[in-house]
């Protein structure tokens, strides 16, 4: 018998609609989603220690996604991070990847792009192999 435990994925974005859309997608994959409106809110959370992956907006008031990622590393918490942004630029992408961010996606991104990043971070794939249909909607 194989016991599968839900992995907790944190979504950190100051845009309510993005938090809700990404949280819904994560839950549809069978994972637990915890959503935060800011990096500071995640840092204050008791759920912080159980996070398997973090999806964070690059540009947020107070603390950017890269700063949040670096803050967690400084605390000894190496949470695999996926950054999303509505304002992509190559220098920010390079800086994020050099900081250890696993994926960098530009909004709007498709559900399949996010699924590929989540699968890469968590070490599995979604789609035909697990009986799920490919999801091609986009997340703004």
Image: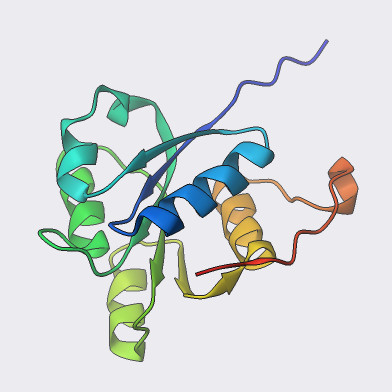
Numbered label tally = 0
Locate residue 51: give its quadrant.
Answer: top left
Q: Position of residue 81 (x, y in %)?
A: 40, 54
The residue located at (10%, 59%) in the rendering is 62
Q: Position of residue 66 (x, y in %)?
A: 24, 63
Residue at 60% x, 37% y is: 27
Q: Position of residue 116 (x, y in %)?
A: 65, 60
Residue found at the very far bottom of the displayed protein: 90
28 relative to 48 in the view: left or right: right
Q: Is residue 31 visible?
A: yes
Coloration of the structure image:
rainbow
On the picture, is 81 further left or further right than 40?
right
Q: Is residue 76 visible in this depiction of the protein? A: no
106 sits left or right of 77 in the view: right
- In the image, residue 131 sits, relative to residue 69, either above or below, namely above
In the rendered image, the residue lying farthest to the left is: 62
The residue positioned 23% from the left and 29% from the top of the image is 45
Image-based side of 37 in relation to 16, left or right:
left
Task: In the rendered view, tell whether residue 81 sits above or below residue 24.
Answer: below
The quarter of the rendered structure image containing the N terminus is top right
Give me the residue at 22% from left, 44% from top: 72
Q: Is residue 130 above or below residue 118?
A: above
Q: Residue furthest front?
A: 17
């Amino acid at each position: 018998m194989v016991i599968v435990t839900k992995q907790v994925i944190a979504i950190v974005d100051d845009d309510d609609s993005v938090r809700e859309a990404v949280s819904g997608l994560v839950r549809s994959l069978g994972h637990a989603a915890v959503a935060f409106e800011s990096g500071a809110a995640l840092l204050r959370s008791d759920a912080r220690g159980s996070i398997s992956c973090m999806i964070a907006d690059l540009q947020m008031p107070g603390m950017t996604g890269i700063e949040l990622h670096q803050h967690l590393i400084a605390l000894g918490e190496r949470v695999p991070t996926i950054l999303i942004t509505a304002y992509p630029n190559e220098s920010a992408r390079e800086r994020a990847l050099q900081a250890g961010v696993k994926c960098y996606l530009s909004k709007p991104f498709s559900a399949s792009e996010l699924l590929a990043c989540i699968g890469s971070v968590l070490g599995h794939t979604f789609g035909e192999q697990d009986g799920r249909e490919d999801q091609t909607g986009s997340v703004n």
